[in-house]
Each structure stands twice: as C-alpha cells, then as structure tokens.
Image (cartoon, rainbow, N blue to C red):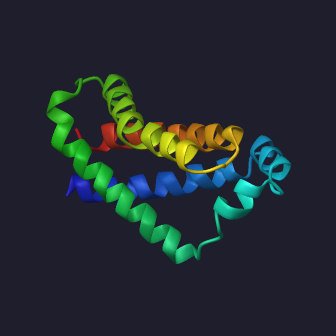
Amino acid sequence: MHVLFAGIAGAIVIFIADGLMQRMPVVIMVRKEYEDFEGVKKWGREARPLLQKIVIMLIEGFFFAFAFALIRAGLSSNVVLATLQFWFLLAAVRIIPESMEFWHETNYPLQLIWLEAGMDAVSGLAVAFTFAFIIA
C-alpha cells in the first residue's frame, strides 16, 4: 500500500517540480535562445496533452516507487542518505544514459541537453526524498 501511495506522490512531485522548473526565467531564456536551432526544431519537445503527461508521470512514479521498495533494505536507514543513494542510482540508470544517448544520436544543443539533465536531476532528487520519506 505504501508503494502505491508513494507512486502517486512521486508522480505529483514530478509534475510540480517539472512545471515549476519549466517556468523559471533562466530556462525560458535558454530555450528561447535556441528555438531556431535546427536540432531543436527537429528534436524539440512537442506539447503533449495534459492527460498524456499525467499518465506518463504516474507510470514513472509507480515504476520508481516499486524499484525503491525493492532495494530499500540495501539503502541506509537515514532518510537523507537513502535519498542520496537512490538519487545517484536514478542518475546512473536514467538521467546520464538518456542525456548521453541524446547527445550522441542528435544534433540537439549541448547546453539544452545539460539543462534538461539538470532539471531531471532536481526532480529525481525530489522524488527520491518522497520515496525515502514514505516507504520506510
């Protein structure tokens, strides 16, 4: 039951964190600077319907909550350390490979790849803390 609740809470955290970061002035400024770049026109994020975004975030939330529950016994009993351990794991299996693949396979601007990886890292940290707090 905790995993189910953590998955929903994680999806909400991802939704809020991503929404807040997308509206940050520095993010808007960097994206505007590259909006005419060929790689951005071809590979840029297309606007998805809200329901589709919510479903994707719920799937991510449930998947990561289940993964956290499976490895919880191997993580520190301290909430902060468990958060950091799971966050590093998220970075190693999701954020870094995704960014490296995008950099290698496309002509997307490197600054935007770093920006997206940084935003993923921040939302990943928030989700890791949410799971460490809920799944004890």
Q: Where is residue 25 in the image (x, y as percent from the top left)?
A: 81, 45
- The mark tally for this picture is 0
Quarter the C terminus occupies: top left
- Residue 91 image point, x, y percent: 42, 35
Query: At 79% across and 44% down in the image, what residue appears?
Result: 30
Q: Where is residue 13 in the image (x, y as percent from the top left)?
A: 48, 51
Using the image, determine if residue 120 lies above or below residue 7. above
Indicate the quadrant where residue 82 lies. Answer: top left
Residue placed most toward the observer, 35 or 83: 35
Q: Is residue 29 left or right of residue 50?
A: right
Percent of width and height locating residue 38: 76, 57
Is residue 126 positioned above or below 31 on the image?
A: above
Q: Residue visible at 59% across and 77% down? A: 49
Name the foreground residue: 82 vs 124.
Answer: 124
Residue 59's place in the image compared with 25, above or below, is below
Q: Which residue is drawn at 38% across and 27% down?
A: 84
Res 46 quadrant in image: bottom right
